[in-house]
């Protein structure tokens, strides 16, 4: 089975540094043996993953590049989404065509967020709301 596709969301882009600032940062990074981070005057010990992200962003800024940061979100193809929902592919396509389950297109391919499938499944578990039958009120 194919792997889920990732799409970036909540992307923020930061402009490249001015040449003078970029060169100063590049020198500091070249000489750095310690990467202590201060937030409001408090020194923080970053986990390795956060340190790698920060150093990579700083390296790119020091090279005069803009930096974008985003959150990857998984997107499922119709087969994966149907399997997750426990329904057939054709029924899933009907649900996306009718707008019941939101769909995104990558070219001509449908992609569905796992959260959309979870929301649809949760909505099916709730009892229907509506008018009560007149006979039940007598």
Image: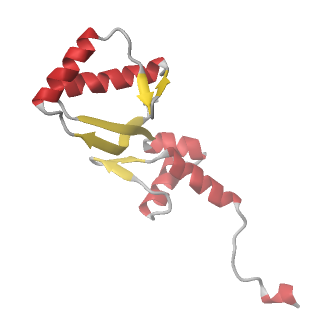
Residue ID at (49%, 24%):
44
- Residue 9: x and y in percent read 37, 45
Q: Is residue 60 above or below residue 27?
A: below
The residue nearer to you, when weighing 61 against 93, is: 61
The residue nearer to you, when weighing 19 against 89, is: 19
Query: From the image, which quarter does the C terminus lie in?
Result: bottom right
Q: Which colour scheme is used?
A: secondary structure
- Residue 83: x and y in percent read 55, 41
Q: Is residue 48 visible in this depiction of the protein?
A: yes
From the viewer's perspective, tell me whether residue 38 is left or right of residue 13. Answer: right
From the viewer's perspective, tell me whether residue 49 is left or right of residue 138. Answer: left
- Residue 113: x and y in percent read 47, 47
The residue nearer to you, when weighing 119 against 30, is: 30
Q: In this view, does 68 lie above or below 127?
A: above
Q: Is residue 44 above or below residue 108?
A: above
- Residue 129: x and y in percent read 69, 74
Residue ID at (71%, 83%):
131
- Taking the view exactly as shown, the residue that stands out farthest to the left is 19
- Taking the view exactly as shown, the residue that stands out farthest to the right is 138
Residue ID at (20%, 15%):
27
Q: Is residue 63 visible in this depiction of the protein?
A: no
From the viewer's perspective, tell me whether residue 126 is left or right of residue 7. Answer: right
Residue ID at (69%, 70%):
128
Across the whole image, how many numbered discs are drawn on residues?
0
């Amino acid at each position: 089975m194919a792997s889920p596709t990732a799409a970036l969301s909540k992307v923020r882009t930061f402009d490249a540094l001015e040449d003078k600032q970029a060169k100063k940062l590049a020198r500091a990074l070249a000489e750095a043996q310690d990467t202590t981070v201060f937030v409001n005057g408090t020194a923080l010990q970053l986990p390795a993953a956060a340190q790698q992200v920060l150093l990579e962003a700083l390296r790119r800024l020091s090279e005069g590049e803009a930096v974008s940061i985003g959150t990857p979100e998984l997107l499922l193809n119709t087969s994966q989404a149907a399997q997750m929902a426990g329904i057939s592919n054709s029924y899933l396509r009907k649900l996306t065509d009718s707008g019941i389950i939101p769909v995104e297109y990558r070219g001509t391919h449908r992609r569905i967020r796992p959260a959309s499938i979870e929301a649809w499944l949760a909505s099916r578990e709730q009892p229907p709301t509506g008018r009560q039958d007149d006979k039940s009120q007598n």
